[in-house]
Amino acid sequence: NCTQGKPLKISDAKDVEIDNFGTDDLLEENPVIELNSVDEIFIRNCNLKKGTQLFLKFGNSKGVEVSNNWLNGAKILEQ
């Protein structure tokens, strides 16, 4: 668990899979996952606690697939 900052930040990567990722402790303004310059990523089976505001923030990335996640109202932001 992460008590400050971003729990998962990925930059300059290709062919990534994230499965069953989550956190109990998160600063409110931070996303659970942040991507920058990632090509081909599959994010699945993540379960967020209620109150999480931002699940995924990504920019300069392509092939971002999100499936079968329990977001509990959290948003996905593409920049």
Image (cartoon, helix red, strand yellow):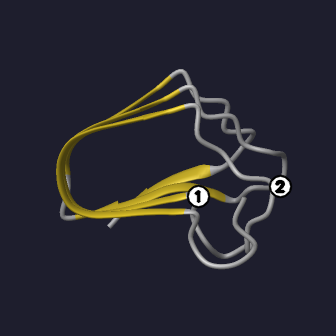
Residue nearest the observer in this picture, 74 or 15: 15
Can you tell which quarter of the image residue 61 is in? bottom left
- From the top left corner, tell me how far across and down residue 41 is, in percent: 27, 39
Which residue does the image show at 57% across and 25% down from the upper left? 45
The mark total stands at: 2
Which residue does the image show at 84% across and 46% down from the upper left? 50
Query: Quick one: label 1, few (<14), some, or many (20+) residues within 10 Å?
Result: many
- From the top left corner, tell me how far across and down residue 35 is, in percent: 34, 61
Which residue does the image show at 69% across and 66% down from the upper left? 2
68 lies above or below 51: above
Quadrant of image for the N terminus: bottom right
Can you tell which quarter of the image residue 51 is in? bottom right
Residue type at mark 2: give it. Gly
17 lies above or below 60: above
Q: Which residue is mark 2?
A: 51
Residue type at mark 1: give it. Val
- The reply, left or right, for residue 70 in relation to residue 66 is right
- From the top left corner, tell me how far across and down residue 56 is, in percent: 49, 54
In the picture as drawn, the residue positioned furthest to the top comes out as 68
Which of label 2 and label 1 is nearer to you?
Answer: 1
Q: CA distance from mark 2 to mark 1?
A: 12 Å
Which residue does the image show at 67% across and 30% down from the upper left? 70
Residue nearest the observer in this picture, 9 or 59: 9
Q: What kind of element bears circle 1? A: loop
Of labels 2 and 1, earlier in sequence is 1
Quadrant of image for the C terminus: bottom left
Q: Which residue is mark 1?
A: 32
- From the top left corner, tell me how far across and down residue 59 is, in percent: 27, 65
